[in-house]
Amino acid sequence: MPGTLLAGRPGNLTSEQEAKLKELWIATLRVFGVALLTDETNESDNVEEADRRSRAETNGSEKKKKRTGLFGKKHKHDDVDGAVIDSSVNSNDKWGQTKDFQNVIANQSPEDLRKAFWSMVKHDNPDGLLLRFLRARKWDVQNALIMMVATLHWRLQEMHVDDDIMSKGEGGALEETKSSNASLRKDGEDFLVQARMGKSYIHGTDKEGRPMCFVRVRLHRKGEQSEPSLERYTVFVIETARLMLAPPVDTAVIVFDMTGFSMANMDYTPVKFIIKVFEANYPESLGVVLVHNSPWIFHEVGIWNIIKGWLDPVVASKVHFTRNVEELEAFVERNHIPKELGGGDPWQYEFVEPKLGENDLMKDESTKQQLLTERAELVKDFEKTTQEWIKGSQAVQQKRPELAERLRSGYWQLDPYLRARSLYDRTGIMGKGGKIDHYGNFNLSSEPTTTTQDDPLPAQQGSKDLD
């Protein structure tokens, strides 16, 4: 039911789960090089004692696992650098994240990792973010830490999520289409053609209040866009959808619209990328996956069996096949199902082109730095308060949620200075202060230039993009 606070989330933790969260915070702060609080006499490390207490609470009769460096007494980054990760703890390392973790610890500075973490937090509750990794790794703290640090590396060094994809956005792609560099120009064109045709888009919510991302598979043709541009656009849509999540809703819905699918649309490479991203880098973000109106060929020639074999069993269990609007209605109210899928929502996808000057606030370095400085102080306060909470202080029980809320609201003040405006900002779906309204009537400041799924694309794109 919408509004229900699910188990394992901030505000709904068992004592054992809270102890695991405290243990992960200790390990996380240690990796970030944050000096742990000590008592006035400096004779003992109170946070280390809390670490031992929290692990004692959760271990119970469990057989203790050997851990070196990560949870021992020393906590300088150099000590973690020499840590030997017990491979038996993470034997099912599907995406090679243990190796990524070890490389990151050896080569990345603690402060860079700390900054990457708080950049990833955005409007999220910091506890909520760590809890995603704990739930994904079945409350194993070491494996959750490995997954989280590997994700930071992926965001910071591999995909450049915040400093490139989201900071450039659609407006940056439009600028790239004017570049004299052929490769850069092609990247911009490939990114924009996907946005203009609405290959994937976010619209509406399901019965649980979760935002829905629709993927119109028939609009994809293998080789028409480069692999990097496909990956960039995929991450752009996922990260944008993430900004539409607000407690208690913390997952999204993907609807793969298979209407008109043929073998010309089948491309395993982006499918593998989507699976990897959700399983390794956006844990616990999928509520349900609906594969709608899939033709016989998708099943008879073994395509689904191949894809299912790549999926984690937990993810596979979230996949449901729907053949008509009545079956879709089990998940989505009929008046929230787009008309093109037989529902009662008359909305249709239209791409509003980036507007001149829409990202001018990103050039205001003075205000941006002021807001970043304020956020940095809030982060320090949250880290300090978290250590006091770990030690068992009752005085900070209310302060931490208040700080988390200040971080959330502060992010939305900072957002227009860091993130390029998107279609969803231009059309009023994403409003001031992070207010999300999928079904309102919006007043645009000017008459937009739009591209619908039925309109011809700009001259540099062929009509075959809409086949």
Image (cartoon, grey):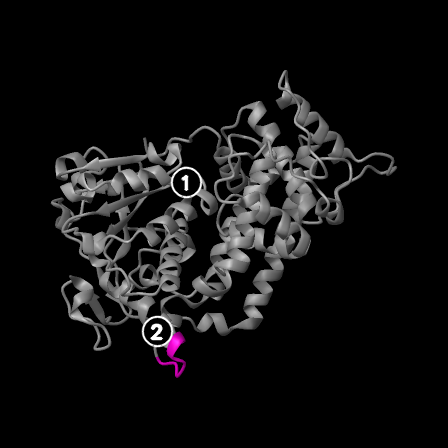
Residue 180 drawn in magenta: yes
**Could you tell me residue 323's position as x and y percent?**
15, 38
Choose between 233 and 409: the one closer to the eye: 233
Give the quadrant of residue 249: top left
Could you tell which of marks 2 and 1 lies nearer the N-terminus?
A: 2
The one of 8 and 289 positioned closer to us in this rendering: 289
Local crowd size for mark 2, using a 10 Å CA cut-off: few (<14), some (14–19), many (≥20): some
Residue on which disc 2 sits:
186
Q: Tag 1: residue type?
A: Asp
Does residue 122 appear in this view? Answer: yes
- Assign the N terminus to one quadrant of the image: top left
Q: Is residue 326 above or below residue 104?
A: above
SS type, badge 2:
helix
Q: Does 357 sit left or right of 145 as displayed?
A: left
Q: Residue furthest front?
A: 301
Q: Residue at x 52, y 73 (%)?
A: 364
Stretch of the chain drawn in magenta: 178-184
Hey, what amino acid is under mark 2?
Lys
- Which of 352 and 176 lies nearest the eye of the viewer? 176
Residue at 63 percent of width and 47 percent of height:
102
Query: Which element carries disc 1, helix, strand or loop?
Result: loop
Q: Which mark is residue 8?
A: none
At 45% from the left and 28% from the top, the residue drawn is: 7
Q: Is residue 410 visible?
A: no
| Spot occupied by residue 80 in the image (x, y as percentages of width and height) | 71, 44
**Mark 2 against mark 1, which lies toward the viewer?**
2
Looking at the picture, does residue 13 appear above or below residue 189? above
Q: Quadrant of the C terminus?
A: bottom left
The circle on residue 250 is 1
